[in-house]
């Protein structure tokens, strides 16, 4: 297993749309999933999208409450309703966070790491925010796209200052 390099904003590759995975029963894909967990734990994220390590395939790993490893391949939101706010951070924008408006409830359909379909649903909590945040990454969207232009400018300025000190 290898810790992979994370892409940081404003890298344009974070804006690429991920392609669906066709063959899950593949050594390369299984290796990639292991590396994604390794990378996510190394940088203490609650989730990680393949896009963030410059692999443009529809794969997400998550461990939102540090209790169960979740893998979502080719995820798709099949139900969404309501609205709620959650404070989000992102490994691709180190050192900053902001309150983001999301759907309160989502139901997501995906394949697990064995290619078996499953559904996961969540309402108004970290998992619900995380699912939407990670699926956004696969579409080239970042949480700062969901805040006001003024707030976004301030966040980017602060992030660049923090990154210079790292
Ligand atoms: O570590 C992370 N925390 C987080 C907090 C609220 C909502 C979403 C997240 S995901 C983020 C890790 C990350 O950048 N995933 O793409
Ligand atoms: Ni993120």
Image (cartoon, rainbow, N blue to C red):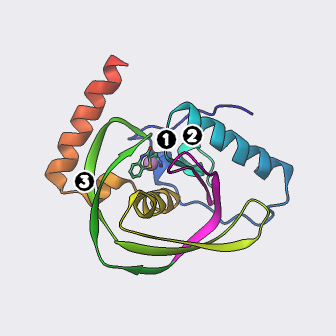
Q: Position of residue 79 (x, y in %)?
A: 47, 81
* Residue on which the image places disc 3: 99
Q: Are marks 2 and 3 in contact (CB under 8 Å)?
A: no
**Residue displayed at 70% across by 48% down:** 33
Q: What is the span of residues highlighted in magenta in the rendered image?
A: 57-77
Residue 5 drawn at (x, y percent): 58, 32
Q: Earlier in the sequence, mark 2 or mark 1?
A: 2
The quadrant in which the C terminus is found is top left
Mark 2 or mark 3: name the one nearer the start of the chain.
Answer: 2
* Residue at mark 2: 40
* Residue 83 coordinates in the image, percent (x, y): 28, 73
Q: Which mark is residue 45?
A: 1
Question: Helix, strand or loop at disc 1?
Answer: loop
In the image, 73 versus 13, the foreground residue is 73
Per the image, is 33 magenta?
no
Q: Position of residue 6 (x, y in %)?
A: 53, 36
Could you classify mark 2 by the number of other residues whose Cα lies within 10 Å: few (under 14), some (14-19), or many (20 or more)?
many
As for residue 70 lying within the magenta part, the answer is yes
The quadrant in which the N terminus is found is top right
Residue farthest to the top? 165
Quadrant hosting residue 34: top right
Q: Quadrant of residue 118?
A: bottom right
Q: Residue furthest front?
A: 67
Disc 1 CB within 8 Å of nearest ligand 1 atom: yes
Q: Which residue appears at 64% of the width and 43% of the height?
A: 36
Q: Secondary structure at mark 3?
A: strand
Mark 3 / mark 1, whichever is N-terminal: 1
Label 2 and label 1: CA atoms lie apart by 5 Å
Q: What's the distance in space between the residues labelled 3 and 1, CA to CA?
A: 17 Å
Mark 2 near ligand 1 (CB under 8 Å)? yes
Q: How many marks?
A: 3
Q: Residue at x 57, y 40 (%)?
A: 40
């Amino acid at each position: 297993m290898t810790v992979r390099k994370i892409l940081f904003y404003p890298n344009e590759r974070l804006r690429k749309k991920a392609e669906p995975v066709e063959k899950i029963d593949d050594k390369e894909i299984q290796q990639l999933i292991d590396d994604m967990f390794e990378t996510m734990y190394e940088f203490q994220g609650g989730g990680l999208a393949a896009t963030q390590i410059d692999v443009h395939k529809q794969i997400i790993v998550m461990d939102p409450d540090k209790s169960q490893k979740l893998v979502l391949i080719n995820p798709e939101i099949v139900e969404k309703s309501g609205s709620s706010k959650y404070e989000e951070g992102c490994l691709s924008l180190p050192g900053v966070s902001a309150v983001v408006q999301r759907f309160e409830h989502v139901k997501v359909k995906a394949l697990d790491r064995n290619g078996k379909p499953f559904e996961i649903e969540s309402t108004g909590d970290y998992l619900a925010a995380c699912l939407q945040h990670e699926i956004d990454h696969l579409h080239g969207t970042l949480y700062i796209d969901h805040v006001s232009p003024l707030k976004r400018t301030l966040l980017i300025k602060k992030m660049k200052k923090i990154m210079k000190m790292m």
